[in-house]
Image (cartoon, rainbow, N blue to C red):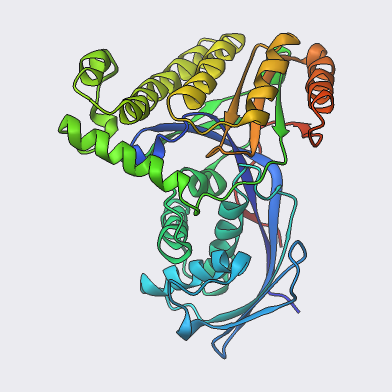
Amino acid sequence: MSDGVWAAPGRVNLIGEHTDYNDGFVMPFALPHTTIATAARRDDGLLRLHSANAAGGTVHLRVADLAPGSPGGWSDYPAGVVWALRDAGHPVGGADIHYESTVPAGAGLSSSAALEVVTALALSDLYELGLERQCIARLCRRAENVYVGAPTGIMDQTASACCTAGHALHLDTRDLAQRQIPFDLAAHGLSLLVVDTRVQHSHSEGEYGKRRAGCEAGAAALGVDVLRDVPYAALDAALARLDDPEVRGLVRHVVTENHRVERVIAHLEAGEAEAIGPVLTEGHASLRDDFRVSCRELDLVVDSALTAGALGARMTGGGFGGSAIVLTRTPAAGAVSQAVLEEFEARSLTAPRIFSAAPAAGAKRLS
């Protein structure tokens, strides 16, 4: 017997990568792929979690015992949300929650954020907390940062909680100001393909944290609080002050990536949807060369798609695997997809999963 059913989507980040923990700009949109939670309240302090997508059966936890540093695999994400809610003073007790998800795990499409946000929304309703969407996003980020131990920014949780259908979300991660930017590619005869390379990653295993620490080192060397404070017009002068080539690359990426977000918005608001293609490709080169978070498979997607006539392409998400996005004219989408598949086959690589993505709605209660 359930008290309700809720859904929260994964996301694709159109542009603005590794900027969120630097107080910068991001521009994600929600996918139609969701994590669904069927949940019922319990008054005995027991949290029972079950996922149709994970082996191992039902996880039993006592909410009073939840604390960071207790590794539990996938269940850390919803357990961390319960911990974060209670740590913030919200009177959350137990629950039975069953999850089913169509968000590809490990694909850079925020399956973890979808799991967190759907849990928080369900518990907010079950316990009549009345939490606003941005509050849910902040609590979910804290769960992932502190309980799970992954030093992510707030983009993924905000996208899952706050996106609207037919729009990309321009989020200023400094003050969390939001603008919904119309993003109707079909009206321009365009399609956005998501290419899941099926290369797995784990942000909590060091490399992500190293990049974040490098960004903090760059900001300190430049005498600013965060890299958001380095103006694009002053980038060359700032880079000349940095001795470490790796830190210099990190700084260059963040500053130019914030500028790319602004350029994409300007093109979309001017009705120049095709013009965002080269900006996406520039972003991939920056992530590959300056931030060093791409991989062989992501580069292959980008290179083969562009060779086949795509308007632009880049990796999306944290990197080291996961997914890429490809902007193409709709009549060419099939040929571009086939070209990518053939290049993977020619190198004896696992065939990627390719699907077309249009901006969907954020988290919601289904029943």
Give the residue drawn at x 47%, y 43%.
155
Give the quarter of the figure containing the C terminus.
Answer: bottom right
Where on the picture, by quarter, is residue 212? top left
Decide if residue 75 is on the left or right side of residue 249.
right
For the residue pair 182 and 113, the one nearer the viewer reads as: 113
Give the quarter of the figure containing the N terminus.
Answer: bottom right
Decide if residue 175 is on the left or right side of residue 262.
left
Residue 231 percent across, percent down from the top left: 25, 21
Decide if residue 55 is on the left or right side of residue 119.
right
Residue 135 percent across, percent down from the top left: 41, 56
Whether residue 269 is visible, yes or no, is yes
Residue 168 percent across, percent down from the top left: 55, 31
For the residue pair 150 and 180, the one nearer the viewer reads as: 150
Give the residue drawn at x 44%, y 19%.
260
Q: Is residue 207 above or below residue 38?
A: above
Give the residue drawn at x 56%, y 47%.
160
For the residue pair 226 and 218, the one nearer the viewer reads as: 218
Give the residue drawn at x 49%, y 27%.
287
Residue 215 percent across, percent down from the top left: 32, 37
Q: Is residue 80 above or below residue 318?
A: below
Number of marks in the rendered image: 0
Residue extending farthest to the bottom is 44
For the residue pair 257 and 177, the one nearer the viewer reads as: 257
Where on the picture, by quarter, is residue 296? top right
Q: Is residue 351 above or below residue 101?
A: above
